[in-house]
Image (cartoon, helix red, strand yellow):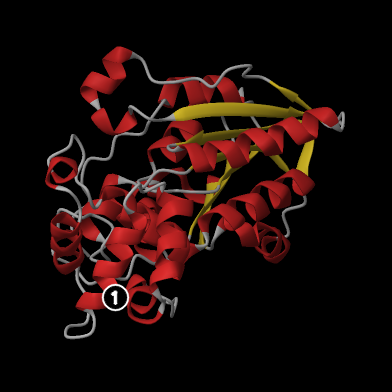
Amino acid sequence: MPKPTVHVPVLLKETIDALDLHDGDVVLDATLGGGGHAEAMLAEADIHLLGLDADAQAVERVTERLASYGKRAVLAQSNFRAVGSVLSKLEVTHIDKALFDLGLSSDELELSGRGFSLQKDEPLSMAFDSRQELTATDLLAHLDAQQLTDIFRAYGEERYAMRIARAIVAHREHEAITTTTQLRELIKVSVPALYAKGRIHPATKVFQALRMAVNDELDALKDGLNAVWEHLSPNGRIAVISFHSLEDRVVKHFMRDKVQLGEGETLTKKPVTPSAEEIQKNPRSRSAKLRTLQKTT
């Protein structure tokens, strides 16, 4: 396995404070990523950690990172939408605290080889779970222009969605689109020149949209939040770090609904965001938002 990069966990102190960990807590890290939050939580209190990640490589890396904590940390490869079955299999009856960090770790971006980073020349898989059959290549090969447009608009909020979709459909008539480089360069030449020279690469939103579609991320998030809520103990807490408006909207609506039902109390009236100092040290943190909800029933 490639050597892990130095992944910097986002909003680390703020997250630890929000979860208010106590000795004996059963804590779920629903998205292990690089393992930074998991390690910090284990160091903060004498907790029992259950860590999940859909990516087997992430689970393997974090298993090595947390080896010194022994049986206090139990890790499993699973999407968090299946947390109920994981808890049942492990005979865990409840969760006291849960963390969802919805960002990609540096390791996933740099080491996965599955096309998450548009800066690398890799196969266009974009599946978190390498066992998954559906890939971004499949979507690009089989969806029509309108279907691709809908994905780019819904998940990427891409202003030139239709233009890019039509370019993809035209291109695949003579060459299959199977790598990040092919897709990146095709998008670059299919949008207006000024847009292509903007602050972010013109392919960024399309890459995000394809990844979200391949992994069914928004529905998985809804399922995962509800599944964790069912197993959350009274006064238990869920903390979620999101990185773009679509994720944050799902989280905000979930927490609002629980408050309106009288089942929860929002502990963050406004989302917690990184300080200027953190953003300077870790530019990837700039769009992060932390929301926390406590169960009251």
The answer to whether residue 231 is seen in the rendering is yes
The answer to whether residue 130 is seen in the rendering is no
- Classify mark 1: residues with Cα within 10 Å, few (<14), some (14-19) or many (20+): some
The image position of residue 230, as x and y in percent, is: 78, 48
**Image quadrant in which you'd find residue 19:** top right
The image position of residue 229, as x and y in percent, is: 74, 44
Quarter in which the N terminus is drawn: bottom left
Q: Is residue 178 left or right of residue 251?
A: left
Per the image, label 1 sits on a secondary structure element best described as helix
Residue marked by disc 1:
169
**Image quadrant in which you'd find residue 138:** bottom left
Of 171 and 251, the residue lying toward us: 171
The image position of residue 263, as x and y in percent, is: 84, 32
Quarter in which the C terminus is drawn: top right
Residue drawn at 18 percent across, 55 percent down = 3
Q: Is residue 38 left or right of residue 228?
A: left
The image position of residue 221, as x and y in percent, is: 59, 51
Query: Outermost residue, bottom direction?
Result: 174
Q: In the image, what residue type sits under mark 1?
A: Val
Of 210 and 143, the residue lying toward us: 143
